[in-house]
Amino acid sequence: MAENNAFVVIGAGLIGICTALELTHRGCKVTLIDSGKPGRGASFGNAGFIASELVDPLSTPDTIRKAMPMLVNPHGALSIPLRNLHRSLPWMVRFAFSARSQAVARGRDALAQLLTTAVPAWQALLDRERLSNHLHRSHYMRVWERAQGKAAALAERNFYNDWGIEAQFAEREQVSALEPALDGQISHAVLLPNAHRLSDPYQVSQLLFKRFQERGGQFLQGHVESLRPNEHGVQLAVSGSKQLFDKAIICTGAHSSELLRSLNVTVPLMAERGYHLNLPSVKNLITGPICSAERNVFISPLQDGLRIVGFSELGGVTLPENPARYETLKHHLGALLPQTKPHLEQASRWMGMRPTLPDSLPVIDSLPHAPCIGFAFGHQHAGITLAATTSQLIADRMTKGVDAMNMTPFRINRF
Ligand SMILES: Cc1cc2nc3c(=O)[nH]c(=O)nc-3n(C[C@H](O)[C@H](O)[C@H](O)COP(=O)(O)OP(=O)(O)OC[C@H]3O[C@@H](n4cnc5c(N)ncnc54)[C@H](O)[C@@H]3O)c2cc1C
């Protein structure tokens, strides 16, 4: 075993679990710390989709143009709670600034670089852990109910093809043939025939966490209050006690800026909140994930039932959830798949916080003046997609000091 390899990974979401597991695989001694139970943060209730096609940053001229109609629509996907405006306003200014054409072009290159590795990285990880049956390949459709959306769908198909992503335009009949449950609702779609998803993101996180423990990884439940580099390594204050490790990696998702303050590092991170309804009694209604381009909701057929997710609520980490969001999700699901209506009242509810930076890029880096501290957070809507990729990249940096790709776009000090 190499020297200086006692790692602490802070945050047991899917990014932290994959990172901790990767480090144990490389022979490191790893402690994984979380203030709660592993996998119960944003990694719990997401749609489990491997979104390799999310090459566009969230901030583009098109997103900015659509923001106002979404805000005024009572069932719109965007919400800016007034009680968090003092935090969301500066973030939104940076977000709007990221919609400049040069910034969008840079963002696309950086995201594409990561996203092309997402499926191979998941396949390699799950094969190695003998869990490959938890990665499913299926079609994925972005659907439109109104025929006016044909030009938008064609433009989207062309965009995907330009980025090397297989995508086709599908008329109503083809959509109905692939997903009979949508019959009559849909005008047309963009069909991605080779998409991937996890069987259930929480279940996968638990299986990977178990593998981590089987490899000798330690889990400690505790809240990390601060961390500081010193001549011996990194000192953590965890739930009132002090702990020393050789190296630390911060994987604390939407909560990362709180911890970074103890390192005098500031990042403009937003907790971009999303909601889900899960219908355990609805199984096999659809065969692949479906996203409504007009309603901005995503429906995923998971192992434990049908899940609808949606919303971009710039609510930060402290506000309570807004129950009205669940009514909106019911409204959209009932309209798209009327067969679900009898099951809507029994659906389980969940709100989670996407860690989103204004340029839509994660931070995957080490601290320039103290490289014993690493970062892997800020994966916005693609943290499940990029968990396996990120774990490789941050483990390469922290164990070997090498990078497998150009990591400049993901620097901690880029803001
Ligand atoms: C509705 C919704 C749908 C989504 N769908 C998808 C999808 O289909 N595909 C996709 O790729 N992504 C999706 N995402 C995004 C994805 O869920 C996130 O990007 C991802 O889960 C982030 O993982 P993480 O490990 O960084 O954070 P988290 O899972 O939130 O984990 C962070 C962990 O850090 C812990 N923590 C924080 N601070 C401390 C501290 N000081 N001390 C100790 N522990 C701490 C927390 O308790 C938590 O367990 C979706 C998100 C939402 C909300």
Image (cartoon, grey):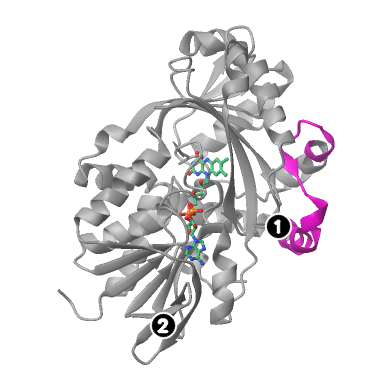
Residue 326 to residue 286: above or below:
below
Quadrant assignment for the C terminus: bottom right
In this view, the residue in front, 218 or 182, is: 218
| In the image: residue 399, left or right of residue 368 | left
Residue 180 location, x and y as percent? 51, 8
Quarter of the rendering containing residue 153: top right
The region drawn magenta spans 70-96
Q: CA distance from mark 2 to mark 1?
A: 34 Å
Q: Give the x, y percent position of residue 2.
A: 18, 77
Apparent side of residue 268 relative to residue 393 in the rendered image (left or right): right
- Whether residue 40 can be seen here: yes
| In magenta segment, residue 81 | yes
Q: Could you classify mark 2 by the number of other residues whose Cα lies within 10 Å: few (under 14), some (14-19), or many (20 or more)? A: some
Amino acid type, residue under disc 2 in the picture? Gln
User: Would you name the residue on which mark 1 appears?
Assistant: 95
Say few, some or many: other residues with alpha carbon within 10 Å of mark 1 (under 14 / 14 to 19 / 20 or more): many
The main secondary structure of the magenta stretch is helix
The residue closer to the viewer here, 111 or 210, is: 210
Mark closest to the chain's N terminus, 2 or 1: 1
State whether residue 285 is above or below residue 85. Answer: above
Q: Quadrant of the N terminus?
A: bottom left
Residue occupied by mark 2? 235
Label 1, secondary structure: give it: helix
Could you tell me if the residues under marks 2 and 1 are in contact, i.e. CB atoms within 8 Å?
no
Residue found at the far left of this picture: 1
Is 32 placed left or right of 286 in the picture? left
* Residue 130 in the image: above or below residue 347: below
Identified by mark 1, the residue type is Phe
- Looking at the image, which residue is at 61% across and 69% down? 267
